[in-house]
Amino acid sequence: MIFKCRRCGSCCKNLFETMGRHRFGLLLTPKEAGLFPRELVKPYMGTERKGKSRPRPAQIIAYQLDAENCPHLEEDNSCRIYDKRPLSCQAFPVHIGLVEGELTVYASTRCELTKDNKDELIEMDRETMNATARIQKEIIQLTQWMRPLNENRWIPTEELAYEYLKELAAQQKVAP
């Protein structure tokens, strides 16, 4: 399918993602974090370790937007910062995440065009799509810590992945 945006605004709404019982916001690089009001930007991913009594990352490598809907979305579904919008927005509907325990690049079902065609590849600017997926994958692979929006603590990624896979296995046992 050829991707042609309908400007429905779905990409800028319902931004929270869940992984198990944890909620996360739109991925932002440290540079992109400055595009949003400070109170809406929270730490997301970290690497290395510091602190013995309260372990946490030594370096924050990504932030997240703590907003259900993007504050830059206009009423006509246009973007106030379109020319400098975050990489996650530029890549949309291409998304990277865990699918059945595997780090996978896929088409987001939040997009009106991909909802009914989620198994089809999206033909876009392949160079941009591949570069975006590579950068997002590198960030995720470097990540040793994640900070869910619904918890006030850093969690080691292995712990999050274990919880998520355990929950998936439980769902498959109960699924009809």
Image (tube, rainbow, N blue to C red):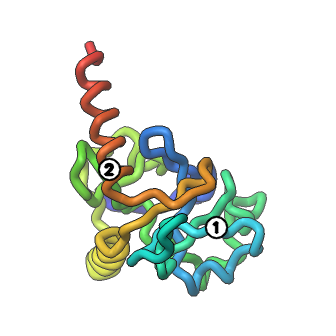
Q: Residue at x 51, y 78 (%)?
A: 60
Q: Nearer the viewer, residue 57 or 27?
A: 57
Q: Which residue is mark 1?
A: 42
> Where, quadrant-wise, is the C terminus in this rendering?
top left
Residue 61 position (above or below residue 7): below
- Image location (x, y in percent) of residue 133: 31, 72
C-alpha separation, residue under disc 1 versus residue under disc 2: 21 Å
Task: Say whether residue 24 is visible.
Answer: yes
Dot 2: what SS? helix
Amino acid type at image mark 2? Ala
- Image location (x, y in percent) of residue 45: 47, 69
Q: Nearer the viewer, residue 154 or 93?
A: 154
Mark linked to residue 161: 2
Q: Residue at x 42, y 75 (%)?
A: 49
Q: Quadrant of residue 125?
A: bottom left
Q: How many marks?
A: 2
Q: Nearer the viewer, residue 155 or 173?
A: 155
Crowding around mark 1 (Cα neighbors within 10 Å: few <14, some 14 to 19, many 20+) is some
- Image location (x, y in percent) of residue 175: 28, 18
Q: Quadrant of residue 153?
A: bottom right
Instruction: Using residue 21 as the reference point, say whether residue 132 is left or right of it.
Output: left
Task: Kindly give the residue lying farthest to the front in the view shown.
Answer: 53
- Image location (x, y in percent) of residue 112: 48, 47
